[in-house]
Each structure stands twice: as structure tokens, then as C-alpha cells.
Image (tube, rainbow, N blue to C red):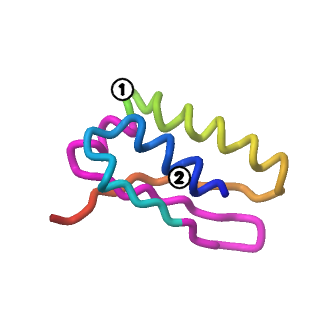
Amino acid sequence: MIENFVRDFAKLIASHPEDIVVERNRLGENFDEIVIYAHKEDAGKLIGKEGRMINALKTLISGCKAKDGISYRVNVRTTEE
């Protein structure tokens, strides 16, 4: 569920929305990592100036922690071409 939200959010920002892929990896009992794979031109857009865009996304995701009790780490990586 949260992966769909993150993917949809990222696609709205990206110039290459077809390249957006989101993975969720379990790192611990109550800790997951969300990795957003994006075109190299979009990685900066997803992070935003001074990290504002990614921090906004992290704030929204923190609301999910209140619901499911899982902490999340969010990373943006570029797709290889």
C-alpha cells in the first residue's frame, strides 16, 4: 500500500514517470526501507532543493508509522541506462 502511494507521488514529480520503480525492503522487525529508483534526471527533483521534497515525502510516510508501527527509511537511487 505505502509503495503505491510513494510511486504515485514520485510519478507526479518526475519527467520520466515510466522509469519510477519503488521497492520496500524489510530491514528489521519494525523497520523497512523504501527505495525509489528514478531516471538520473529525476533523482534531483525527487530530493528537491535542500532535501525539501524528500523530507515532505518522509513526513507523509511518518503518518503510516502511526498506523502500522513500522519505521521507514527512504532512499532515492538512479536507474542504470
Q: In the visual, does 7 lie left or right of 14?
A: right
Q: Which mark is residue 11?
A: none
Q: Is residue 29 magenta?
A: yes
Which amino acid type is shown beneath numbered disc 1?
A: Lys
Q: Quadrant of the N terminus?
A: bottom right
Position of residue 59 measured from the top left corner of the image (x, y, whole percent): 64, 35
Which amino acid type is shown beneath numbered disc 2?
A: Val
Depth order, front residue of 8/77: 8
Q: In the visual, does 69 lie left or right of 5?
A: right
- CB under 8 Å between callouts 2 and 1? no
Q: Is residue 53 magenta?
A: no
Position of residue 48 measured from the top left corner of the image (x, y, whole percent): 38, 31
Q: What residue is pinned by disc 2?
A: 74
Position of residue 41 measured from the top left corner of the image (x, y, whole percent): 21, 43
Answer above or below: position of 30 versus 49: below
Q: Quadrant of the C terminus?
A: bottom left
Crowdedness near tag 1: few (<14), some (14–19) or many (≥20) residues, C-alpha within 10 Å = few
Q: CA distance from mark 2 to mark 1?
A: 16 Å
Picture residue at 64% right of the left edge, 64% below the top: 32
Quarter holding residue 80: bottom left
Quarter holding residue 34: bottom right
Magenta extent: 24-47
- State which tag comes first along the sequence, 2 or 1: 1
Q: Which mark is residue 49?
A: 1
Crowdedness near tag 2: few (<14), some (14–19) or many (≥20) residues, C-alpha within 10 Å = some
Answer above or below: position of 57 versus 33: above
Label 1: state its secondary structure. helix
Picture residue at 28% right of the left edge, 57% below the top: 78
Picture residue at 76% right of the left edge, 73% below the top: 29
Label 2: state its secondary structure. strand
Furthest-front residue in this view = 18
Picture residue at 54% right of the left edge, 48% below the top: 6
